[in-house]
Amino acid sequence: MKRILTAILPVVLVLSLSNCKKDETAIKATLEQKKRNTDAVAAITPEVGVVYGAVTIKGDFGPADPGAIVKFNGTNAILNNATDTSIVVTIPEGSASGLVTATVNGVDYTIADNYKILQLSRDLVMNSPIAITKMAFDRVDVGTIYATDAKTIYKLRSLSSPAVLYTAESGTGIINIATDKNGNVYAARSLAFGASFDVVRIDPSGNLTQMFRSKNGNADGHISTAKIPNIIDMVIAYPSNNMYVIGGFRIRRITPNGDVSTRADYTAGGWFDNIKYLAVDDKSYIYTAYAGVVVVSPSEGYVIGIAGSRNVYQPIDGDRFVSAFSSAGPFTVDNKNQLLFVSDYNLLRIVNTGYYTSTYKRPDAIAANGVFYDNASNKLYLTSGNKLARYSFK
């Protein structure tokens, strides 16, 4: 028996060492594969996400996989687009901060260990001392808000304590206000609350200067001779200080030097009905809506439909070929270049940079007719007459 045990022990030892080596090899291979999968991921943007926002994951994933799966802390994301080097997804409702993973072409990837996701959170609902129609935010004196009731522009250091900045002359009104990077406030003034007849600038000292007047016809050139009829909306891009206006079914750009050019022309092809509302992001992409479609103009003469359908008039979430609404606007753009707007009288909608439309579920019942975003404070405001609601992304 002793001889048998002596003969068996070396064999058992060899087998044990062999199995240990195999286990070590398997563990090493798994770790190396995990490292390769992690190394394949180059970046995830933005660094902090928001629910319903778009996230882009760049990396070496092999062939484009239309069945790619991305999960935020276990919750499946909405796939917007997939190529061999990038995946664009929408963060769905119910997602939470934490682990981000992806499965592409059958291979599992760890995208981020602790990715932060912000949620829309209501700060307050209050009765405003003025019936706000438009708001703008000071880019120099951060925290100062400008608001108008279509007749007077108020300066607010506190939401409950407005101070008069400017009152339109008798027989005129204010259709929109905007601010530039130098602390100036601009107002598009109207006659009998119709299309604007001019745009004025109010400097930090309260001095008023007429920038230009509406003129019949359509002609680019210097502002002194250019013709822009019936201005119905106005925004100012940051940091370029270029002004964009809708007038004569065209979007025109006016530089700080007074040069006027046509950014987009909607007079041809029947695309001219209901063009109104304007927003601009920090890349100077211009957003507007016409014929039941929300569009973006990334550059001169180039327009992309990003939400809505000409033939569907009900609120539907989805990509740019599916989403719909019965009405859209006004517009604003957040600090992630995502379009926020009110549709169907009370719904707060978001079109993210992947051009996917979602609807925020709000705890209040404000029938919002105004939506405004303050980039400096990351605050969103909804207004309806004398009602005001403020939200943060937390």
Image (tube, helix red, strand yellow):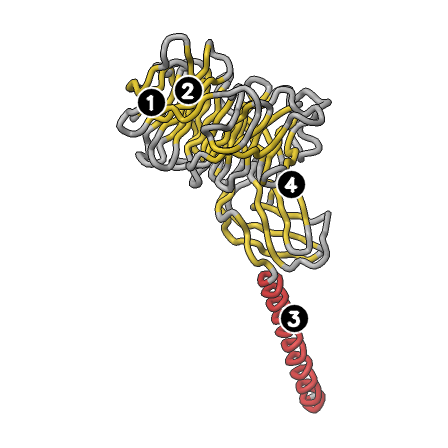
Mark 1: which amino acid? Leu
257 left or right of 36?
left
Q: Name the residue that disc number 3 marks.
A: 26
* Res 78 label: 4
Say what secondary structure mark 4 lies in. Answer: strand
Q: Amino acid at mark 2?
A: Leu
Tell me if mark 3 has few (under 14), some (14-19) or many (20+) residues whose alpha carbon lies within 10 angstroms of its own. few
Q: Is residue 328 above or below residue 111?
A: above
Measured in 3D between alpha carbons, the distance from the residue under mark 1 to the one under mark 3, in whole angstroms, is: 64 Å
Which residue is nearer to you in this view: 107 or 173?
173
Q: Residue at x 50, y 48 (%)?
A: 115
Labelled pair 1, 2 in contact (Cβ < 8 Å)? yes
Q: Is residue 16 left or right of residue 246?
A: right
Q: Where is residue 187 drawn, in percent x and y?
A: 41, 23
Of the numbered discs in the image, which one, if any, rests on residue 388?
2
Badge nearest the viewer, 1 or 3: 1
The residue shown at (64%, 34%) is 306
Q: Amino acid at mark 4?
A: Ile
Choose mark 2 or mark 4, whichever is in front: 2
Q: Quadrant of residue 272?
A: top right
28 to 253, vertically: above or below: below
Residue 68 at x, y percent in the picture: 69, 49
The residue positioned 48% from the left and 35% from the top of the image is 259
Q: Could you tell me which residue is drawn at 48 percent across and 45 percent down? A: 48
Q: Is residue 387 visible?
A: no
2 or 4: tag closer to the N-terminus: 4
Between circles 4 and 1, the one closer to the viewer is 1
Circle 3 — which element?
helix
